[in-house]
């Protein structure tokens, strides 16, 4: 499955971004039952799970983003979103989505004054 992320960019602290990840080659019967996740890898850091959403829309978040980030999915568009608010410099990272064994190339988020 090919996953394509978008929506990253440069933002000031306190700002917001909405990331999107589209499964461009997935068929509905594969996408809909899948758990989808957003990961990030900051400079000099290991990859960490940011948020995940199951097929029944049960969600899970890293403690560092709870209350600030919201993950959602639109099965009709085969897309998973990550709404990020109140961004902090420590949120700076390459964000990528994962579905099963497939992972996208990522989209860069940079939070700087």
Image (spheres, rainbow, N blue to C red):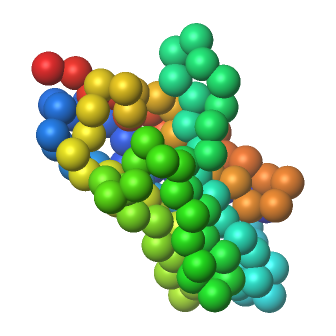
- Residue 102 at least partly seen: yes
Q: Position of residue 92 (x, y in %)?
A: 39, 27
Q: Residue furthest front?
A: 63
In the image: residue 67, left or right of residue 75: left
- Residue 27 at least partly seen: no
Q: Residue furthest top?
A: 44
Decide: is 37 above or below 35.
above
Decide: is 1 above or below 77.
above
- Image quarter where the N terminus lies is bottom right
- Residue at image coords 50%, 81%: 74
- Residue at image coords 53%, 49%: 62
In the image: residue 9, left or right of residue 58: left
Q: Which of 92 and 62 is in front in this view?
A: 62
The number of callouts visible is 0
Q: Where is residue 113 in the image (x, y as percent from the top left)?
A: 14, 20
- Residue at image coords 43%, 42%: 64
Q: Where is residue 58 in the image (x, y as percent from the top left)?
A: 59, 79
In the image: residue 22, left or right of residue 89: right
Q: Nearer the viewer, residue 32 or 60?
A: 60
- Residue at image coords 55%, 87%: 76
Q: Where is residue 45 in the image (x, y as percent from the top left)?
A: 60, 19
Q: Residue furthest right?
A: 101
In the image: residue 64, left or right of residue 44: left
């Amino acid at each position: 499955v090919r996953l394509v992320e978008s929506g990253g960019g440069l933002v000031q602290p306190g700002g917001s971004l909405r990331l999107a990840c589209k499964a461009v080659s997935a068929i509905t019967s594969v996408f809909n039952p899948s758990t989808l996740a957003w990961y990030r890898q900051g400079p000099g850091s290991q990859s960490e799970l940011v948020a995940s959403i199951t097929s029944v829309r049960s969600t899970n978040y890293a403690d560092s983003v709870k209350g600030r980030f919201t993950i959602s999915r639109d099965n009709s568009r085969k897309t998973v979103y990550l709404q990020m608010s109140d961004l902090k410099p420590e949120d700076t990272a390459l964000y990528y989505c994962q579905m099963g064994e497939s992972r996208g190339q990522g989209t860069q988020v940079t939070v700087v004054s």
